[in-house]
């Protein structure tokens, strides 16, 4: 009977130690994942700020009062009515001219 209780005690100690090691590894993994998530969140915030700056720069550069004098110096003029044509809105490429103009 003493041998059985000794085996139970040894098994209990081994189970406790393996549980402690397992919990430690899980805690380390969680800590690593939290650090990565925080780094990703900081990168996202930085990218959002960069996007806001780029949008502001694009808005500044796309102002007609800035573009018109530059275009005239290059010899460009607004299109004459004869240069314009109707577009077929039933085309699968519908809206591509609007998107190209927005860039």
Image (cartoon, helix red, strand yellow):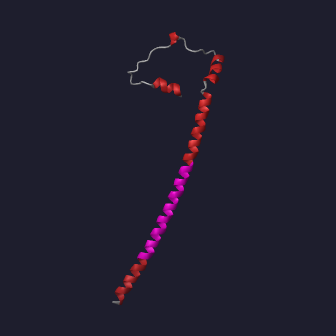
Taken as a whole, is the magenta stretch helix, strand or loop?
helix
Q: Which quarter of the image is occupied by the N terminus?
A: bottom left
Specify whether 29 is left or right of 1: right
- Image position of 95 with respect to 34: above or below: above
Q: Residue at position x 61%, y 26% from top?
A: 63
Q: Is residue 92 left or right of residue 103?
A: left
- Name the side, left or right, on which 3 lies relative to 96: left
Residue 72 forms part of the magenta stretch: no
Residue 15 percent coordinates (x, y)? 41, 75
Res 11 → quadrant: bottom left
Q: Which residue is drawn at the image coordinates 56% and 42% (left, top)?
A: 48
Say how many tags the image has.
Answer: 0
Residue 32 vs residue 61, the one in the foreground: 61
Residue 21 location (% of width, % of height): 47, 71
| Residue 3, percent from left and from top | 36, 88
Q: Residue furthest left?
A: 1
Residue that lies at the very extreme toward the top in this rendered image: 82
In this rendering, is residue 9 above or below 82? below
Per the rendered image, the range of residues in magenta is: 15-42
Q: Residue at 42%, 77% (x, y): give it.
A: 14
Compared with residue 28, is residue 77 higher up or lower down, i.e. above or below?
Answer: above
Residue plotted at (43% across, 76% down): 16
Relative to 31, does residue 20 appear above or below in the rendering?
A: below
List x then y, in percent, for residue 73. 66, 17
């Amino acid at each position: 009977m003493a041998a059985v209780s000794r085996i139970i005690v040894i098994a209990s100690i081994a189970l406790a130690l393996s549980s402690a090691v397992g919990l430690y590894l899980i805690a380390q993994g969680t800590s690593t994942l939290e650090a990565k998530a925080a780094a990703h969140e900081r990168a996202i915030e930085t990218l959002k700020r960069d996007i806001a700056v780029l949008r502001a720069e694009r808005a500044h550069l796309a102002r007609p009062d800035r573009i018109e004098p530059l275009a005239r110096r290059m010899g460009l003029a607004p299109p004459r009515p004869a240069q314009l044509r109707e577009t077929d809105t039933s085309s699968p490429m519908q809206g591509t001219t609007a998107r190209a103009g927005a860039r």
